[in-house]
Image (cartoon, grey):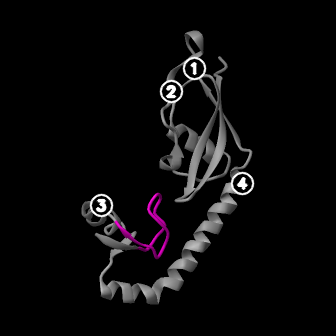
């Protein structure tokens, strides 16, 4: 099914792109979320009228995300956790904990934006990506230290 993207969608395209996607992906996700319109002749004509506004809005969002990425540059988060034998943590450091530590630094991100392949279970310093926009990621250093008793 062909759709017109009304928002930037990761790994799919930018605003205004006409892309071919699976029918279920379009009907169950993209269209209900307002990220795309079905590529009919009427929608194509209507989209052409709104295109400059949508492109301008997407550009503003990208610029805001880039300025936020500059604030993330060089950011090191320190998270204290209880430790057992062989520097193994009781529990683990999750994306929600990292998002909370970022919030403590005065920056706002959702835990879904923190890209953590698996929870952190040992002490050390880890590079963690934070997705700020569909095509923009910032990297933060997460230092896991033992909790002082």
Res 65 quadrant in image: bottom right
For the C terminus, the image quarter is top right
Evaluate if marks 1 and 3 touch, with contact meaning CB atoms under 8 Å apart. Answer: no
Between the C-alphas of marks 2 and 1, the distance is 9 Å
Find the residue positioned furthest to the front: 20
Give x and y (percent) for residue 108: 59, 53
Question: On the image, which quarter does residue 35 sit in?
Answer: bottom left
- Left of 135 or right of it: where is 147? right
Q: Residue at x 28, y 61 (%)?
A: 22
Q: Residue at x 64, y 45 (%)?
A: 139
Crowd band around label 4 with a 10 angstrom C-alpha radius: few (<14), some (14–19), many (20+) = few
Disc 2 designates what residue? 92
**Residue 9 magenta-highlighted:** yes
For residue 63, above or below residue 135: below
In the image, what residue occupies the spot 52% across and 43% down? Answer: 115
> Where does the N terminus fall, quadrant-wise?
bottom left
Badge number at residue 71: 4
Q: Earlier in the sequence, mark 2 or mark 1?
A: 1
For this view, does 83 lie left or right of residue 42?
right
Q: Which residue is mark 3?
A: 25
- Separation of disc 4 and disc 3 at Cα? 34 Å
As drawn, 52 above or below 127: below
Eye-nearest disc, 2 or 1: 2
Closer to the chain start, of discs 2 and 3, is 3
Please give the range of residues in magenta.
5-20
> In the image, which disc is placed on residue 82?
1
Where residue 133 appears, as percent x and y from the top left, is 55, 59
């Amino acid at each position: 099914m062909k759709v017109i993207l009304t928002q930037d969608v990761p790994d799919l395209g930018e605003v205004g792109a006409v892309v071919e996607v699976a029918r279920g992906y379009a009907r169950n996700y993209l269209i209900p979320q307002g990220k795309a319109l079905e590529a009919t002749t009427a929608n194509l004509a209507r989209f052409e009228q709104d295109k400059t506004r949508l492109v301008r809005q997407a550009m503003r969002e990208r610029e805001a995300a880039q300025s936020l990425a500059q604030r993330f540059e060089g950011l090191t988060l320190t998270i204290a956790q209880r430790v057992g034998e062989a520097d193994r943590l009781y529990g683990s450091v999750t994306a929600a904990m990292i998002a909370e530590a970022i919030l403590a630094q005065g920056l706002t991100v959702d835990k879904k934006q923190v890209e953590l392949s698996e929870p952190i279970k040992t002490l050390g310093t880890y590079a963690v990506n934070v997705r700020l926009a569909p095509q923009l990621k910032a990297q933060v250093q997460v230092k896991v230290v033992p909790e002082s008793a």
